[in-house]
Each structure stands twice: as structure tokens, then as C-alpha cells.
């Protein structure tokens, strides 16, 4: 059955395909160009929306647009709640509590003052909109953190604040609006208080009950594995709908609470659930930002005056820093991290969606200045997305709060040959971390000055103590093939499967021992096994770094060193990448290569570290 559309409008199917394609395409292009994805998504939305008129969300989706955005934001907030594990907070716990319990109310007051004295809004509109400005946007923070690669604690502070304060901002707006209703005799004090208490209490109780109930059902095996994600989605939508029916916007609180409960329930299937939701969230974030930008009304923006610029300066450079510095005073959070958090406060889709809703309600009560709330919300989102999108990474790098300048390598296993490889990498200015459950296996690495971690890389201790954000490549190289496969499979989603390698397994000659492509990592050193690598080192082979030039190309090197095992390449800009074989090097410009070479080879301009322990 065909769906009727307005003249010139896109069909809902085409509109959804367009939004999805542009959203994901913008994310991919941003990854390739190493640009902030959100900036490209906003730009794409503006081009297909108000600039060209190809896509108009209100026209093409009609009354479905608001529910689509509401459900998308609910799923995004739930996925954010799934990442909030209390065991991972550690030294960031005090800072998070202060940003929530002190920062939220203080930010509300300062934002209200900025709106009244800066933007010129009435006190009623300022208090309602100021409550919404508490939010810092998990839809924006997540992509920014993915790009900036911050150190653990500032990343946790920004992430937790964004996710926890998001529903609190919506609730603050509800509270302020109820007060406005009472002051304008549109509601009684008792009725307003009763509605708030009932709505917030019901949302919290519903989120807790759903989270604990679902966790208990999963723990006791009441839900088959193949239905877990389906039931999770269905319950999420049901909880959001029921809570929102009692008090508008309280559904965001309910799903966030539900996500936090599940994140801390120690579910065996937690990682699979979180990864699936994370993939869904990337698609949803892309879509809602395209919708947000495409729905921009230039006529509404024309209502803004020079006071909008004053408002932006006050919010970004006064209210936000004062809120953070006051909240974290005496918290023990280092000043550099405080500065980074203070000047990082991007806003996202939730702000625009909730602001638009309350702007309509205030207009119905006769507050004409509420017509400025929507445009102010959009320009604040656009300004903060552009500013933080382009400055967060360099600003954090300036403060020394990012991973290593050149992402390094994590080597699992403290054998003699892995130590020799680590020495060659360090000599080439590639950061290296060696880990092994056996403290003694790392003795030679420690003597060579290589960073080490004695323990299981998959343990909670490693997750809490290691800053893996500084490393982009992983090599599983212990003498246990099963353990190598486990590590490579488990950490592949975090590092990217193209960046996870392992030594070849001993038994792969028959179908009984061949693993599927979904398990393990990529081949290392042209398929060499652990024992083969150890034997070669004992026979005098060494890891050497060779610089390729226009006169001495990769082809020349391959012809001159046919027996050597190619391991990695380093581009002139310091970008490091491990390779499986020579085929991975095709088309690579002037660079350095690292290879395991036989003894007594002629000098070709390369250099080699001494054998392990003799550096």
C-alpha cells in the first residue's frame, strides 16, 4: 500500500534512507579525514535541509518526527547508562558526585542569569530554559571522546556528567515550568508538587525495577541468549513510554536509571549487550543530528539579535567554567583536568528537543520571548559542537591529557623475542607496553627500560590501571595459543580488528584445528609461530629498522632480504602500523620498516638493538 506524501516531499522510506546514509557517511568521512564527525553531520543536515530544501523533517515525517527523536534520545541515554559502571570510577568518583550534586544546581542558576541578563529573556523563560542548559549532551560527548582519546579520569568526568545530568536537566525544566504555572494561576501549588513527586518517583522506581528485574531474569536463565537484545529493546521502549505518560520527559530519567542498574549487575552477557547498543547508538546519533540540522528554520534565527552572542560567551566562557571550578574545588582533581572539563561543555539533541517543547508551552501561557528559546538552543548547540569539535583534542594535548602523540603497541607475553621486538620499537620512538601474568617473564623488559604490567590484560585491575587509550595496536604473543586467541578476540572491538595481531597457532593443518575468521587476530610476521620466533632469536636473528627511500624501495629491500620477516612500518609522520606481510605495504610512501632479519647481513643503512638485556 502506497503512503501518500505532500507535493515535493520525500517518502518516509526515502527520507529515512537519506538520513541514515548521510549520518553514517559523515561519520566515516570524519574518521578518514580525522575531523569531528558532529561538525560534518550538522553541515550535511543544513545542506539537505534549509539550504537546498531537499529534506524537510516536519514535512517528510510529519507527526512522527517528535516520537522518532524522543525514542532515539531514550536509546542513546540508556546506552550511556550502560557504560556507567561504578567499579570503573575509582579516583573520578568524587569529581562526578560534585559535578552532579553541586554542578547541576549551580549551573542552573548561572545559566538562568546568563539568559536573563545576556539574552534578555524574562525570568520565567530564563528559569525554564536554564534548567535545560544543565545538560552537556551525551550525544555529543561520546563522539568527541572517541576522537580526542583523552586520559581516563577527564574522560570519565565528562561522560558521567553528560549522561547523569541529561535527565536531570529535563527534570529541572519540568520543575521550573510547574513553578511558572503556579505563579500564573494555571495550577495549584499542591497539584504541581504532587505531579512532580509522583512523576520523578515513578520514573526512578520504574527504572530500578526494570533494571533489577531484567538482570535477575538474565542471571537465572529465564531468557534465551538469542532473545536478550530483543527483550532489552522492548522493555526499554515500554519503560520510556510508561514513565513519559505519567510525567513528560521523566522517561529519560527512567531509562538512564535502568541502564546504570544493568551496567552494575555483573551480567555475563553484558559486553555483547553493550556493544550491540553502542552500534545502534552510533546510527541513532548520526540520524538525530541530521534531523536537528535539517529542521533548522532560518526565519527563526533571524529573530536573534546581538544579545545572542553575549549569551553564548556567558554560557561557554563564564557559566560553565565557574560551575566546574566551584564544583571541583578541594576535590583532589588536578588543575589541568579541571581546566579541560571547565572549558568542555558541548550541548546536543536533548537540549534542542526539550527546549522546543517548553518553548511551545511558554508561548501558550503568553510569554512571547519564549519564541527565542528554540533559536538560542540551536545556536548554542552549533557553537559548542564546532568549538569543542575542533579544539578538544589539541587543547587536551596541550594540557597533557591525551594518549601518546604516536599511538603505541601493547605486546602480550614476555618472551625473549617479544622483548627484542619491543626494544626495536622503542628505538624507533614507538611507545610500547609489555604485559605478562608472570612477573619473572618481564625481567629483561624492565631492565631495558620498557613499560610493563604484570597481570592479566583482561583483568579488572588492568582495566582500571592501564591507560590503553595511548595504544592503537595489540600483539598477542604468549606461548599459549588458546590464551592468545582469547585476548585477540576479546580486545578486537576496542582496538579494531585490523589492529589486533597474534602469533600463528601451532596446529592449523587440519579442519579440526582451524579457527573461524571471527576468532583471534591477524597473522603476525608472515605466519610465524611462537616457537619459531624464539628459535630465530636464539640463532642470532635480530629486529632491525630500515629506512626506505626513492633509491632503496620496498621492492629492493624484498629482493635483498628474501628470508626476513616483515613486522611493521612507520610513516614519516610517526604513524605506526603492524603488517601481516609485504602485501600490506603496497602503495606506502617513503617510510621505515621493521623486520626480523637473519644474522650476518650486509649493512643497508639500518640499525638494530642489542640482544635482550644488553641495551
Image (tube, rainbow, N blue to C red):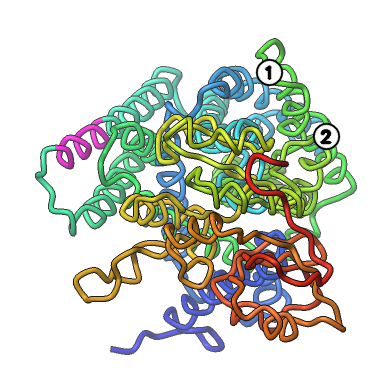
Residue 94 percent coordinates (x, y): 57, 17
- The reply to whether dot 2 and dot 1 touch (C-beta < 8 Å) is no
Left or right: residue 146 compared with residue 219: right
Q: Which residues are magenta?
A: 209-219
Q: Name the residue tied to disc 2.
A: 317
Based on the displayed image, in which of its 4 quarters is residue 335 positioned? top right
Whether the magenta-drawn stretch holds residue 527 is answered as: no
Left or right: residue 26 compared with residue 416: right
| Quarter of the image that includes the C terminus | top right
**In this rendering, is residue 105 above or below 527?**
above
Based on the displayed image, in which of its 4 quarters is residue 512 positioned? bottom left
The structure residue drawn at horizontal position 54% and vertical position 62%, both measured from the top left corner, is 499
Residue 135 visible in the shown view: no
Residue 372 percent coordinates (x, y): 72, 48
| Quarter of the image that includes the N terminus | bottom left
Q: Main secondary structure of the magenta part?
A: helix
Residue 245 percent coordinates (x, y): 32, 42
Counting every numbered tag in the picture gives 2
Residue 141 percent coordinates (x, y): 61, 46
**In this rendering, is residue 584 above or below 347?**
below
Pointer 2 local density, CA inside 10 Å: few below 14, some 14–19, many at least 20 = some
Circle 2 sits in a helix, a strand or a loop, which is it? Answer: helix
Pick the front one: 259 or 523? 523
Which is more N-terminal, label 1 or label 2? 2
Q: Nearer the viewer, mark 2 or mark 1?
A: 1
Pointer 1 local density, CA inside 10 Å: few below 14, some 14–19, many at least 20 = many
Whether the magenta-drawn stretch holds residue 213 is answered as: yes
The structure residue drawn at horizontal position 40% and vertical position 54%, both measured from the top left corner, is 71
Circle 1 sits in a helix, a strand or a loop, which is it? Answer: helix
Q: Name the residue tied to disc 1.
A: 328
The structure residue drawn at horizontal position 46% and vertical position 43%, both measured from the top left corner, is 80
Amino acid at each position: 500500500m502506497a503512503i501518500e506524501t505532500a507535493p515535493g516531499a520525500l517518502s518516509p522510506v526515502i527520507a529515512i534512507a537519506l538520513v541514515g546514509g548521510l549520518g553514517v557517511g559523515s561519520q566515516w568521512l570524519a574518521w578518514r579525514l580525522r575531523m569531528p564527525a558532529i561538525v560534518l553531520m550538522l553541515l550535511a543536515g543544513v545542506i539537505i535541509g534549509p539550504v537546498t530544501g531537499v529534506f524537510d523533517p516536519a514535512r517528510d515525517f510529519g507527526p512522527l518526527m517528535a516520537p522518532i527523536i524522543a525514542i532515539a534520545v531514550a536509546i542513546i541515554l540508556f546506552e550511556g547508562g550502560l557504560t556507567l559502571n561504578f567499579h570503573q570510577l575509582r579516583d573520578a568518583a568524587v569529581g562526578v558526585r560534585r559535578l552532579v550534586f553541586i554542578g547541576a544546581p549551580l549551573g542552573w542558576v548561572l545559566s538562568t542569569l546568563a539568559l536573563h541578563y545576556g539574552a534578555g529573556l524574562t525570568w520565567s523563560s530564563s528559569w525554564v530554559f536554564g534548567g535545560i542548559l544543565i545538560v552537556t549532551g551525551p550525544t555529543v560527548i561520546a563522539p568527541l571522546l572517541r576522537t580526542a582519546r583523552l586520559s581516563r579520569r577527564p574522560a570519565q568526568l565528562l561522560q558521567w556528567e553528560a549522561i547523569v545530568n541529561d535527565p536531570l536537566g529535563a527534570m529541572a525544566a519540568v520543575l521550573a515550568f510547574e513553578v511558572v504555572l503556579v505563579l500564573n494561576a494555571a495550577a495549584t501549588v499542591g497539584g504541581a508538587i504532587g505531579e512532580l513527586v509522583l512523576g520523578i518517583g515513578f520514573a526512578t522506581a520504574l527504572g530500578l525495577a526494570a533494571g533489577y528485574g531484567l538482570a535477575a531474569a538474565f542471571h537465572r536463565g529465564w531468557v534465551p541468549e538469542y532473545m536478550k537484545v530483543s527483550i532489552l529493546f522492548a522493555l526499554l521502549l515500554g519503560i520510556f513510554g510508561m514513565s513519559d505518560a505519567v510525567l513528560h520527559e521523566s522517561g529519560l530519567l527512567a531509562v538512564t536509571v535502568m541502564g546504570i542498574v544493568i551496567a552494575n549487575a555483573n551480567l555475563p552477557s553484558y559486553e555483547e549487550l553493550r556493544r550491540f547498543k553502542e552500534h545502534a547508538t552510533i546510527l541513532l546519533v548520526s540520524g538525530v543530528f541530521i534531523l536537528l540540522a535539517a529542521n533548522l528554520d532560518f526565519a527563526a534565527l533571524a529573530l536573534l539579535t546581538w544579545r545572542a552572542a553575549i549569551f553564548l560567551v556567558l554560557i561557554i566562557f563564564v557559566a560553565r567554567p565557574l560551575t566546574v571550578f566551584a564544583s571541583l574545588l578541594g576535590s583532589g582533581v588536578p588543575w589541568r583536568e579541571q581546566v579541560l572539563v571547565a572549558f568542555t561543555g558541548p550541548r546536543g539533541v536533548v537540549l534542542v528537543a526539550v527546549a522546543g517543547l517548553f518553548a511551545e508551552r511558554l508561548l501558550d501561557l503568553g510569554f512571547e520571548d519564549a519564541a527565542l528559546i528554540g533559536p538560542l538552543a540551536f545556536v548554542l548547540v552549533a557553537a559548542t559542537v564546532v568549538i569543542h569539535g575542533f579544539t578538544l583534542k589539541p587543547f587536551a594535548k596541550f594540557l597533557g591529557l591525551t594518549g601518546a602523540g604516536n599511538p603505541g603497541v601493547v605486546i602480550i607475553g614476555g618472551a625473549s623475542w617479544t622483548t627484542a621486538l619491543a626494544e626495536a620499537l622503542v628505538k624507533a620512538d614507538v611507545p610500547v607496553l609489555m604485559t605478562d601474568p608472570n612477573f619473572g617473564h618481564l625481567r629483561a623488559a624492565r631492565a631495558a627500560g620498557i613499560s610493563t604490567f604484570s597481570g592479566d590484560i583482561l583483568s579488572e585491575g588492568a582495566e582500571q590501571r592501564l591507560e590503553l587509550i595511548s595504544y592503537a595496536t595489540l600483539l598477542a604473543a604468549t606461548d599459549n595459543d588458546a590464551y592468545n586467541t582469547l585476548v585477540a578476540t576479546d580486545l578486537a572491538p576496542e582496538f579494531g580488528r585490523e589492529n589486533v595481531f597474534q602469533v600463528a597457532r601451532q596446529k592449523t593443518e587440519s579442519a579440526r584445528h582451524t579457527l573461524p575468521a571471527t576468532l583471534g587476530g591477524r597473522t603476525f610476521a608472515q605466519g610465524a609461530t611462537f616457537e619459531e620466533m624464539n628459535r630465530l632469536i636464539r640463532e642470532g636473528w635480530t629486529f632491525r629498522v630500515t629506512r626506505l627511500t626513492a633509491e632503496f624501495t620496498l621492492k629492493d629491500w624484498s629482493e635483498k632480504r628474501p628470508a626476513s620477516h616483515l613486522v611493521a612500518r612507520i610513516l614519516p609522520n610517526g604513524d605506526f602500523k603492524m603488517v601481516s606481510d609485504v602485501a600490506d605495504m603496497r602503495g606506502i610512501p617513503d617510510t621505515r620498516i621493521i623486520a626480523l632479519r637473519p644474522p650476518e647481513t650486509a649493512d643497508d643503512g639500518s640499525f638494530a638493538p642489542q640482544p635482550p638485556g644488553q641495551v
